[in-house]
Image: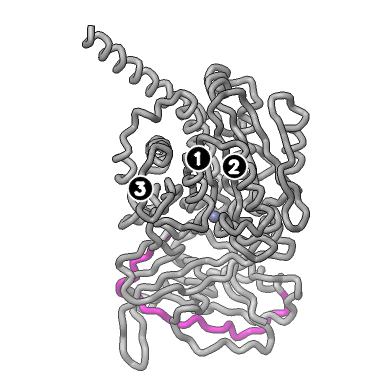
Amino acid sequence: MRVFFSVLFLLTSLYSTAQQQDLTTSLYETYETYKEPLLEKRRIKHKDIQPLIEKCKTNPKFKVAKVGTSIEGRSLSLISIGEGETDVFLWSQMHGDEPTATQAIFDIFNFLNSDDFSSEKQEILANCTLHFLPMLNPDGAEVFQRRNLLGIDINRDALRLQSPEGQTLKRVRDSLDADFGFNLHDQSTYYNAERTEKPATISYLAPAYNYEKEINEKRGNAMKVIVFMNNIIQKYAPGQVGRYNDDFEPRAFGDNIQKWGTSTILIESGGYHNDVEKQEIRKLNYVSILSAIYTIAKENYKDIAISEYDKIPENDRKLFDLKIENATYPLSGKDYILDIGMNRLEVDKKGHNNFWYSSRILDQGDLSTYYGYETLDATGHAIVQGKVYPKLLSSIEALGSLDIRALLKSGYAYVRVENIPTTKLASPFPIHMIGKRYEVPDFSIEVGLNPTFLLKKDGVFTHAVINGFLIDLNSDKKTNFKNAMIYR
Ligand SMILES: [Zn+2]
């Protein structure tokens, strides 16, 4: 008899694992059907999500309540769905420039509102009630900054509660006394999974609730759900998951919400190759969060061993956008071998709807413990200063009609242009534009400078680095070049 029940149990559990995998695969494959088309870029604002929240208000499936107001007067809304006993609370973007999960939440609404996946949805909504608070920091989102209008990090305001946004989060958490909490953020794209070149596309943490980092049932459940989600991400972005250090931060919301009795899961969306607007990462949020909700509804996360949590590699911060290795750098008549790590920093345009790049050298020397999204082994290549093209051009159009690749191949990195409109912020060509009287500073490779130089081997220019973008001068392959600089 016992054997029979064990076999039955094993079969049931195998069956539900298979069911779960089927759901995850289908969610991934059908994603485009539910992707909210109005939110396609990271710079989204309060006014962009209001029409979508209004749509939920007129839909009897959802309950929408205004639960607070930001300092600048923007409404904070809680959108709920389901009749189940298990309360799941998800909040996003308490840091204004971290919008990836906000986008995924609206994709999840489209999914929940559709007629598809009816048996899985029935399972979810009969067992759980889901509560979403998207864009907790709309004032920060307005200017695409981390902090709120008071200039504080809301995630250090869980105890003092000076921000109305933090007060709202605390009040909603307490009124729901939710079983599970999803604390949804973005992290720097320069995080990697420890000792690998793989970006930490998603990082997780089941925050500690005391300095001793004890694990009670609530925190243990959060760890189990994280192990479950990690297995999903591994399928679509192998090796690209990191685990945050769990040092207790007494002022943070995640740590306190865990302490207040909600199993809290921190999800950080990081970087992914060639995904500047983080749309693939948004999709991974959608798939993994919905799958996690399903496993919470079915309670089969309970079978997962907590020890699996510690096997997720730790987060590290060892990535550059571009890393050049082993280049030869001549200085005061002697040659030195240098690795150079460069990042492309985003500068917002007016209105904070778009951006351009101003790049910097972040580090140089032996960078053998670091990695690059793009890496070039420049062994045997000399670093050479880019020259100023001797002819003064009348306009940007005149520059556009030149063969810029030929200029780079001749060792030029700057072109003098007579009339550069003041509205122009950056050069659309892979060569810097300089004003009539601008003097290019003395050349050096130095932390903090804009990475601009050429690489030369056997008397031939092979590569140009312009504003941190690598251009292979012997290949016509399309590059990820976005813009060079303008120096007036
Ligand atoms: Zn954050």
Q: Is residue 143 left or right of residue 266?
A: right
For residue 279, which numbered disc appears in the image? Answer: none
Quadrant containing the N terminus in the rendered view? top left
Q: Quadrant of residue 425?
A: bottom right
Whole-Å distance between the Cαs marked 1 and 3?
A: 15 Å
Q: Quadrant of residue 80?
A: top right
Q: Is residue 378 magenta?
A: yes
Report which residue position mark 2 lands on.
173
Give the SS element for disc 3.
loop
Any atom of ligand 1 within 8 Å of the CB at mark 2? no
Residue in the image at 37% along x and 65% along y: 376
Question: Disc 3 or 2, which lies upstream in sequence?
Answer: 2
Report which residue position mark 3 lands on.
214
Q: Position of residue 54 (x, y in %)?
A: 77, 36
Q: Position of residue 31 (x, y in %)?
A: 56, 33
Viewer-proximal residue among 412 and 46: 46
Q: Circles 2 and 1: CB distance less than 8 Å?
A: yes
Indicate the quadrant of ligand 1 in the picture: bottom right
Q: Amino acid at mark 2?
A: Arg
Q: Amino acid at mark 1?
A: Thr
Q: Amino acid at mark 3?
A: Glu
Give the SS element for disc 2.
helix
Q: Magenta: predominant secondary structure element?
A: strand
Question: Disc 1 or 3, which lies upstream in sequence?
Answer: 3
Residues in magenta? Answer: 374-395
Give the SS element for disc 1.
loop
For residue 262, which numbered disc appears in the image? Answer: 1
